[in-house]
Every structure is written in C-alpha cells, then in structure tokens.
Image (tube, rainbow, N blue to C red):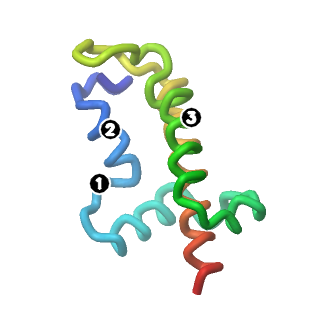
Amino acid sequence: MQATGEAIDLHAYWDRMFGGYVSAPGAIFDANDKAGLSKVQVDREKIKILDPDVWTQESFVLGKTFAYAEPVLSEGTVSVLPRSYETDARNVARSQAALAAASLNISR
C-alpha cells in the first residue's frame, strides 16, 4: 500500500513510477516532464559499461536495497509504504532511467 493509501502490487508500483505508459515515447515524455530526468547527473563511467551481466547485478543489488527494503519484506504481505520509501524509490528510478537514457545517447 502506498503512503497515499492506495493498495497496489509492488511490481506495478515500480512499473508505473513514471506514469505507467506502455509506449517508450510516452514514458520518456512523462519521465522528463514530471521527474526532470534530463537534469539528473549521471556517472560518466557507468555510461560506458556495455555488459548486460553488470547491469543485471547492479539492478539486483538496487532491488534488494530499495525495492525489498523495510517495510517490504516478504511476498504476500501488505505493507504501508512510508514517504521515505517512496522518495528513495523515485530517486533510484530517476537515476537508473537517466543512466539508461544517457547510455542510449552515447551508443548512437
């Protein structure tokens, strides 16, 4: 459950972080318009990493650290997400989305 009181599946919560668009252009517009994605500073060294195994490991660590952090501990439980969880979630999502966007720009 979000801090707003809305009951939502955790996977859906993260999927709709930038508005829940199905199309890539819609998601990009929403992420930049609402979250100021183009203003997020990106680690220039991470942009150069092209190994999907490295991306997977980083995502795994971020997931354990942020997505499955307190109060989300086990499958099948209902947790109220405090504002601190939502703030961390939004910051991680913005950072990763900005990194992905920068990586796409550099690979052109």
Residue at (29% x, 54% y) in the render = 20
Query: Along the polypeptide, which appears first: circle 2 or circle 3?
Result: 2
> Vertically, is 97 above or below 101?
above
Q: Secondary structure at mark 1?
A: loop
Find disc 2 in the rendering and name its residue: 13
Amino acid at pointer 2: Tyr
Disc 1 to disc 2, C-alpha distance:
9 Å
SS assignment at label 2: helix
Disc nearest the viewer among 1 and 3: 3
What residue would you read off at disc 3?
A: 61
Sort mark 3 into few (<14), some (14-19) or many (20+) by Cα contacts within 10 Å: few
Amino acid at circle 3:
Val
Q: Where is 47 relative to 11, above or below?
A: below
Please tell me the numbered disc located at residue 64.
Answer: none
Pinpoint residue 71: horizontal percent, then vertical percent.
43, 14
Local packing at callout 2 (Cα closer than 10 Å; few below 14, some 14-19, many 20+) is: some
Q: Position of residue 86 (x, y in %)?
A: 47, 31
Q: Residue furthest bottom?
A: 108
Looking at the image, which residue is at 38% across and 23% down? 3
- Residue visible at 33% across and 54% down in the picture: 19
Mark number displayed over residue 20:
1
How far from the left and from the top, in percent, is residue 23?
A: 28, 70
Within the image, what quadrant is residue 100 found in?
bottom right
